[in-house]
Amino acid sequence: MGLQEDFDEHATKAKTLPETTTNENKLILYGLFKQATVGPVNTSRPGMFNMKDRAKWDAWKAVEGKSKEEAMSDYITKVKQLQEEAGSA
């Protein structure tokens, strides 16, 4: 299975992670997903009153500089880790 197929499969699995998944981990996944699918941040940072979108933007900005392949690989690893922690590997 190629990296893109593996990434797509884990993106689907990420949607089934338990509700107990921390926001921090969700933000890590979000940032890696955006970096893998869109590339570097291409929008300005949301204002301070828009905390949710600002946190998502910050998570994406934190992985800026990773290649698409690197971001995909890290995303797959993180999903696997969270599944193991949830006991649903």
Image (tube, helix red, strand yellow):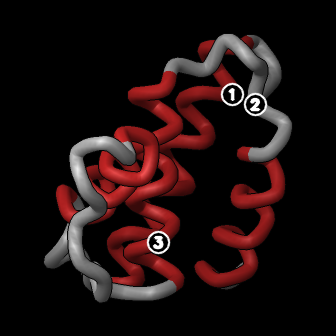
Whether the residues at callouts 1 and 2 have beta carbons within 8 Å, the answer is yes
Horizontally, residue 15 falls left or right of residue 73, namely right
Viewport quadrant of the N terminus? bottom right
Q: Looking at the picture, how far across and down is residue 73, in whole percent? A: 45, 65
Q: Residues within 10 Å of mark 1 (few under 14, many from 20)?
A: some
Determine the residue positioned at 38% across, 75% down: 35
Mark nearest the camera among 3 and 2 is: 3
Residue 14 to residue 8: above or below: above
Give the camera-side residue of 43 and 47.
47
Mark 3 or mark 2, earlier in chain: 2
Separation of disc 3 and disc 2 at Cα?
Answer: 18 Å
Mark nearest the camera among 1 and 2 is: 2
| Three-letter code, disc 2 | Leu
Residue 34 numbered mark, or none: 3
Horizontally, residue 45 falls left or right of residue 80, namely left
Element class at badge 2: loop
Q: Residues within 10 Å of mark 2 (few under 14, many from 20)?
A: some
Give the camera-side residue of 31 and 9.
31
Element class at badge 3: helix
Horizontally, residue 78 falls left or right of residue 59, namely right
Give the camera-side residue of 48 and 25.
48
Separation of disc 1 and disc 2 at Cα?
Answer: 7 Å
Q: Which residue is mark 1?
A: 83
Which residue appears farthest toward the front when viewing the image?
49
Residue 17 numbered mark, or none: 2
